[in-house]
Image (tube, rainbow, N blue to C red):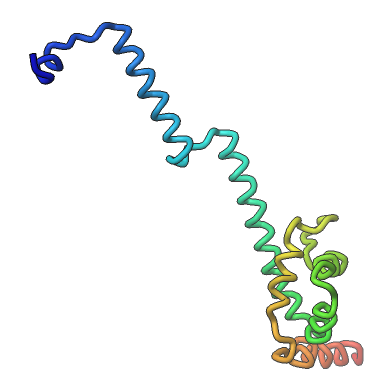
Amino acid sequence: MSISEKFSNFQASKAVLFWSCAACVAATMVVGFTWGGWVTGGAAQERAEAASEQAVAQLAADICFSRYLAAPDARASLVALTEESSFRRSGVLEDGGWVTFAGREDPIDGAANLCARQLAEVDATTLPQASPVAETAAPLAETTTAQ
């Protein structure tokens, strides 16, 4: 009797069918969770929360960066910030309130470090000596107090 004949005449019992299905389910789960990218609901929730916190920190860092460079004394402040050690820069930004928004008492976690990294890449010599906003605000202040 050949192998093809044995295979065509094979009749599996209920136990063999059950354990074959159980093995296929287990193998599918192992492959799915290890290589397939499947995660549990709790792990998905943790990843979503971490991603949202990172997005908030990145947004706050971008706002900090823009506000810092738009300040009237941006060039002098940037020079002073770059003279600080890289470990102290985020503390300087937090103490200055650059990453504390909308009535919050505490700065946004991780934003100061991201903002400090962005500011470290700016060449202070490319910034103007005084902000155009400060120059236009001074004549307005003089005209309102003179009346």
In the displayed orientation, state which residue is furthest to the front: 1
Quadrant assignment for the C terminus? bottom right
Between 24 and 116, the residue placed more toward the observer is 24
**Rendered location of residue 134, percent (x, y):** 80, 87
Front residue of this view, candidates 9 and 103: 9
- State whether residue 100 is above or below residue 27: below
Q: Residue 108's quadrant in the figure?
A: bottom right
Residue 55 location (% of width, % of height): 63, 57
- Residue shown at 39%/30% (left/top)? 28
Residue shown at the point (85%, 69%) measured from the top left = 92
* Residue that appears at 29% across and 12% down: 17
Q: Where does the N terminus fall, quadrant-wise?
A: top left
Q: Residue 9 at x, y = what percent? A: 12, 11
Q: Is residue 61 left or right of residue 86?
A: left
- Which residue ends up furthest to the right in the rendered image? 146
Query: x%, y% of residue 121?
Result: 68, 78
- Up-down: is 83 above or below 87? below
Q: Is residue 5 left or right of residue 132?
A: left
**Splitting the image into 4 quarters, where does residue 117 fall?**
bottom right
Q: Nearer the viewer, residue 142 or 117?
A: 117
